[in-house]
Image (cartoon, rainbow, N blue to C red):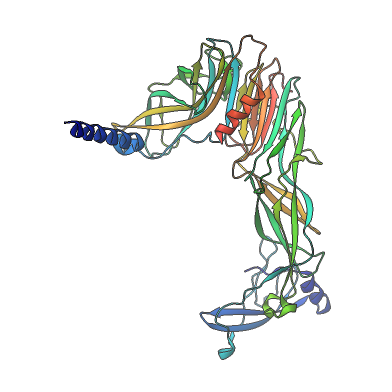
Amino acid sequence: MGIPVTSAVQAQAQAADGLATFEFFVWFGSSEATSTETLPVTSAAISADGATGDVGTDGSQAAALSSFASLGETAPASPPACVWLASGSSVEESNRIGQMQDSTGSGSQVRWTYNTEADSSFGVGVSGSLTSGYSGDGSYSVSNSIGSSGGFPENAGFNEFVDGHFYRQRYASDLDSGGHPICGHRYKAEFRRSVGDSYPGANAPAKDPYGRCGNDPNGLATMAAHGGFYNADRGHATNYSGAATIFDLSVHGQTGYTGDIHVDYTNNSSLSEYVCGNAELPDAPILWPNNNSGV
Amino acid sequence: MRPRRLARFGLACLLAAACAGLAAACGSSITGLVGNLNHGNSAGISVLAGEPADYTGFLENRTGQAIVLESARLLPLPGFATPRLVHVTIEAGRDFAVAARDWPPSGGDYHLHPFVGTRVPSGGRVRILYSVLATKLGEYGDAGIRVTIRASGDTGSVTVQSVAGTCVVPSSDAECTASFQQRIAKAAG
């Protein structure tokens, strides 16, 4: 079980010498029990005197909880459902959904195709504050299921990330409208739906680290000159660590795992062109092309 | 007599359909042949009439035992005229041909080995280069090849997916149309 260090937790720790008090609720069948623990909010190891836990390699702490006291007859039949209520309107944002590169050889062309039902998955953020202090809390799958389908062609030398528009929705816990205290004053934000468009993104991804396909240890695929083409299924998803932002939180994104995104290479140049990638083809999530002059 | 003949004919059709649909059950119990590694991908090229077009399919052996490749036949692609299969071989080098011309294809370091008799160890993967031919102008497509294998005296077969579009053009400076390329990509899913 993880406990997010929200802005509310940080505020309490600042006011109490780095300590924050948590109330844990546990349900055993239809019986409810609680335990109250005061834990340090720090990346430093908890002292042996406290004997409550150790800091893990990722900075997380393990804490032993004291015994739980039964609440007896007041226990609910089951854990309460923390209902999230939409807070404000959805906001359209530009998220990263892929990347596309092309050879710089004259006559080379590349096209990004983004079909309906192409799924994306983006991180979900939670916070104790409306517009800041968000931390990651799982992911949410977004389907491009509104009937949109499209893409864009590019010419030789293209090397950019590909972005698409998604709608982000913020939710608030229902404590103020009678919800259970366990739900707390919390906010959650996630991307709920896709516009279904795609376009060149703002930044350029890293180029082939091997310099050219001929040096790629994963091998290479050859497209003949004067009209060879390769429509590469991007069903092998790539995970981007900074694919989207939720207020002050950068979240991961993953697109293409349903296989409805393609990068289409057409070699209308007079030289053979190669496609290689960061894994053995045809499984490579990232592809890099160049021609037999290495450009 | 007529009703009895019709009944026999119907029974024969039923058996034929059952064996066509359940090839593994009728001919082999070999499981673990993976031929869909290229699923979703497609490729193509323009060629002159009578000029071979070459494509690659992938086969992985997860049967738990070594297999030996025996034969291959071309699979039609619905909605397209089917070319003729003229060559099958193994690409053993670092390169493989996504879409190439002539036979053997030029422009790559393919290290071609004979297809028939190739032994694929358990856990191994092979790249199968096949070549098709069409003699009339037009647009052709295939869905890959059906490969027959042998393992421990048993025989089985597997579809090696490779959606490929071959357009036969009147001159060497002509290329496949964008709409043909898109239709091929769509057929690959």
Question: Would you identify the image quadrant in which residue A266 lies?
Answer: top right
Q: Is residue B66 left or right of residue B170?
A: left
Question: Would you identify the image quadrant in which residue A265 lies?
Answer: top right
Which residue is rendered at x = 75% and y = 21% of the image? A105
The front one of A174 and B65 is A174
Q: Is residue A24 above or below residue A220?
A: below
Residue A293 x %, y %: 72, 18
Residue B37 x %, y %: 51, 35
Residue A156 x %, y %: 76, 25
Q: Is residue B80 left or right of residue B156?
A: right
The front one of A294 and B155 is B155
Residue A204 x %, y %: 79, 38
Q: Residue furthest bottom?
A: A73
Q: Residue furthest front?
A: B2
Which residue is rendered at x = 71% and y = 29% of the image? A110
Image quadrant occupied by the N terminus of chain A: bottom right
Number of marks in picture: 0
Q: Is residue A245 above or below residue B61?
A: below
